[in-house]
Image: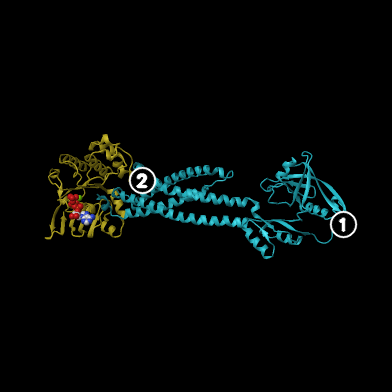
Chain colours: A yellow, B cyan
Amino acid sequence: MAEQEERKPIYELRDVVKKRASDSYSFSLRVPSLRIFPGEKIALIGESGCGKSTLLDMLAFVLQPTSCEEFVFAAGDEPEDISAAWRRSRRNRLARLRRHHLGYVMQTGGLLPYLTVRENMNLSRRILGMKKDDTVDELAEELGLSRHLGKLPSELSTGERQRVAIGRALAHRPSIVIADEPTASVDPFAAEKIMALFIEMVEQRNITVIVASHAWRHIKQLGLRRLAHHTRRSKDGHAAETVVSG
Amino acid sequence: MALRQSLGLATRDYFHEWQISVCFVLALAAVLGPMMVLFGLKFGIVGSMIEELREDPAKREIRPVGSGRYDRAWIESLRKRDDVIFIVPRVRSIAATLEVQSDRANRILPLEVIPSAQGDPLLPPGSAAPKGLGEVVLSASAARKLQVSVGDGVDGSLSRRFQGRKERVHLPLTVVGVAPPRSFSRDGLFASVALSEALEDFRDGRAVPALEWEGEAAEGERHYTGFRLYARSIYDVAGLEEGFERSGIEVRTKAADIETVRRMDRTLSAIYWSIAVIGLAGFSLSLGASLWANVDRKRKELSVLRLVGFRTGDIVWFPVVQSLYTAVLGWALACAIYLAAAWSINLMLAPQLEAAQEVCRLLPRHYLIALGLTLGASVLAAVLAGIRAARVEPSEGLREI
Ligand SMILES: Nc1ncnc2c1ncn2[C@@H]1O[C@H](COP(=O)(O)OP(=O)(O)OP(=O)(O)O)[C@@H](O)[C@H]1O
Ligand SMILES: [Mg+2]
């Protein structure tokens, strides 16, 4: 713990709130305090609808918080004030942070249907203008995708597509990988294998990882830090609030 | 860098989804092609009518009705006007004939003498005009009947009853030109004004010293009974006609024909433009709607691009590039549709047309205008749709079902 305190956290959030309301239901996610340090492996476990995707999207700078006291991201040389960037609509600045520091594995899909597996995995590297090397081939080897590199995503099974998405999130060596239920759409047996492989790969590369999942049992043996949260529902069932901290 | 990526990805996507792209291209060409045919027809029909008017000097002629009394100074004052390109005085028409004989054809042909000069619109530009008392230009039919061509000599003769005797004189003439059949269809002879005056003098019993024809001495100033006048352009005819009528000279012109064509041009233009405006509006709407719908359809993929870090500007390029492809391909297809339609229309109507006339015709710049309009409309629609796509929060697009 003391060792961690010396290092600067990658994420530092204080009193970040996202409110979402539809006609008869309002949901709010509150993060009184959250710090994530480099190299940490974070798990966000909770039932469906408790706000996992909401939190991850905010951490990936694709969802604007309703209000926030402090939201600092420090993967690069300089800490970035995310709340200020949102307030001033500096979207291209946020895009730049995503480009350089983030990998995102979506619950399903997220691959470009018109690019081959190889090109999909290489997408982030290409945007960053990174040199061609064997990174993609090595990743494909590890993910068991070598045979599929020339195919289009539509020719793959769901599990294979998720592995391609994992490959793409890792290929440009980001500081953080965020995965929103990466194995939700595959069968439990395959899910466990893919999750184990994923965690192993980020560990090897010393990448900070934040994974959301609705089942703790798949991942409890993988040594992740579980974020504490609880959801309160109003008696009439029209409102819910989730508070996350860690 | 990212911009180039964006262009490359947009291209890949466009051709990956070729079925849908083909539909967009077809939809565009289906509106643009017929519009081009419509404009080609309007331009071709009215264009060839106007051209015909312009090229036919007879349409610019202003001829006095009956005979008047005009002096040389009056003719000169008309010549100085800007809207008059050619004028020569005419002598009495009864005196303006000549009997002509050639060695080859054994017949005597009575010819109508037409006073002419350099710049006569009935003679092809750049060809010789008759000069002096010995040169003539024959009409095509006269030359054919006399079996003569440029450079040949013919014999002209005319007679009079003078002091109770019948007299006939001959004068040698050189054919310096043959007028094209369409400018004068009867048997005629273009002569200098001096020669036509000499013929009249002889008939009137006056002397023509230059040709050694005897008679009474000329007295007083010469008066002409008419003139040959051509307006500078078809657009000057109506104005000149009005001027003559105002000064009490009744003239006959083709102003009515010209006005008919011009009115037709205006009417056709009005019809065309109303159709074109409606068509263009429909075209922009259909193009805009399809591009807009396309961007909507692509929202998830565009969100993925934003998730991996494309800037807003790069995202906007994506639909723009695709709409440029649609615009250019659709335009090319529309041109092909137009060319096929124009070819068959022209072929179908060829028997009713003079050579080289086309009912359906476009100039290169019309193709370019069509391309410009298409590009403009599609880029505008795509930019608007693209900006809208870029405005949506990426997480919204990502979670789309
Ligand atoms: N765009 C939206 N507008 C309004 N409410 C929303 C919107 N997106 C999500 N919500 C609400 O926010 C709550 C949290 O949604 P979220 O997607 O974060 O849940 P989750 O924990 O990721 O669920 P799952 O495990 O099913 O993916 C849900 O109750 C949902 O109804
Ligand atoms: Mg979710």
Chain identifier of the residue bearing label 1 in the image: B
Chain identifier of the residue bearing label 2 in the image: B
Q: Nearer the viewer, residue A107 or B257?
A: B257
Pinpoint residue B232: horizontal percent, then vertical percent: 65, 56
Residue at 30% across, 60% down: A88
Number of other residues with Cα within 10 Å of mark 1, as a class: few under 14, some 14 to 19, many 20 or more? few
Q: Are marks 1 and 2 on the same chain?
A: yes
Residue at 48% across, 55% down: B273
Give the side of residue A49 with respect to residue B310, left or right: left
Please name which of the two marks, 1 or 2, marks the residue nearer to the observer.
1
Q: Mark 1 vs mark 2: which is more N-terminal?
A: 2
Q: Which residue is mark 1?
A: B216
Amino acid type, label 1: Glu
Give the side of residue B106 with respect to residue B183, left or right: right
Q: Secondary structure at mark 2?
A: helix
Q: Secondary structure at mark 1?
A: loop
Residue furthest toward the front? Answer: B164
Question: Does any portion of residue A188 appear in the rendered image?
Answer: yes
Residue A182's disc is none
Figure quadrant of the C terminus of chain A:
bottom left
Q: Is residue A141 depicted above or below B220 in this figure?
A: above
Q: Nearer the viewer, residue B23 or A17?
A: B23
Q: Which residue is mark 2?
A: B10
